Amino acid sequence: MDREPNLGSTPAPPLDRPEPSLLTKALTFRWATWLSELTGYLSGVALVAATFVTAHGVFVRYVLRESTIWQTETTIYLMMFVTFVGAAYGLKHHAHVGVDLLVERVDGRARLAWKLVTSVLCLAVVLVVLWLSFQMWHTAWQGGHRSATAWRAPLSIAYAILPIGMLLVALQLVAMIIEGIQGLRGRIPLSEVSLMRAATELAHAQTHIEVVELAEAKEAADEARADAARADADSESQPEPEQGPARPGRATERGSD
């Protein structure tokens, strides 16, 4: 007699989720995080270049005794690039200074909601700076403005750094806000939300500092015990002073009298 298969114990096959379309991937702004990571490396290259340009200017001025024309101005523009274009990289890795006195008092979705509100406010400020800096760049580009130095560098290149940097920061903020909204709706775990990882990174940094401080305190205590043991060993190894012949006391002297 044939036995019927036990269908109840057979696990159900996993449901295949459809691959998100290219438009869906673009609307999640995940590409903005990759762009922010790229700007970090570009800022590092600009920082190295600024170092070499500064060294070249020092060599030309103090060794060759010649005047510098483009070195100082180029270094300033490169440092502007590091500051404003690299700001998106710092935002992605939570490297900017922030006051989280109230935010850290709540947990879970309440903390994420607070962080979303602050991110939206930051985005509003960044958009204002982006618009004003764009107007400043457009004026310099239309008027053909140049720097008042011997090099006469076009200011449209230097003024373009600020709106580009603010645009990158705005894109990174939009990506973080969209990801935070998905976390509030339960589509992704809160542990994978970038806004929630800021507290985790801070906690890791504080834990690392505490571990280092404990290790330094333990090392100092070990050194103190070693010094005390060394001092005791030195005191025990020293020979006791020899006593000379006993001098006659007063009683003997009085008796002889």
Image (spheres, grey):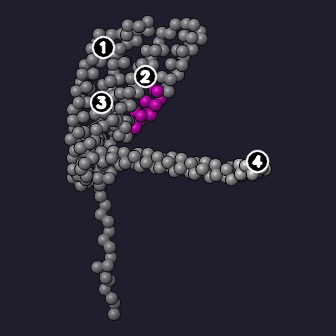
Disc 1 marks a residue whose amino acid type is Ala
Cα distance, mark 3 to mark 1?
19 Å
Q: Is residue 57 above or below residue 109?
A: above
Asked whether 37 falls inside the magenta stretch, the response is yes
Q: Is residue 196 magenta?
A: no
Q: Is residue 176 left or right of residue 221?
A: left
- Are dots 3 and 4 in contact, CB under 8 Å? no
State the residue at coordinates (22%, 27%).
128
Counting from the top left corner in percent of width and height, residue 17 is at 29, 58
From the image, tell me which residue sits under label 3. 167
Gap in angstroms between the C-alphas marked 2 and 3:
18 Å
The residue wearing badge 4 is 257
Q: Mark 3: which amino acid?
A: Leu
Q: Residues within 10 Å of mark 3 (few under 14, many from 20)?
A: many
Image mark for residue 140? 1
Q: CA distance from mark 4 to mark 2?
A: 104 Å
Residue 31 point in image, percent of width and height: 34, 40
Q: Which residue is mark 2?
A: 78
What SS does tag 4 mark?
loop
Pointer 3 or 1: first along the chain: 1
Crowding at dot 4, Cα within 10 Å, few <14 / some 14-19 / many 20+, comes out as few
Measured in 3D between alpha carbons, the distance from the residue under mark 3 to the one under mark 4, in whole angstroms, is 113 Å
Instruction: For mark 1, give the secondary structure.
Output: helix
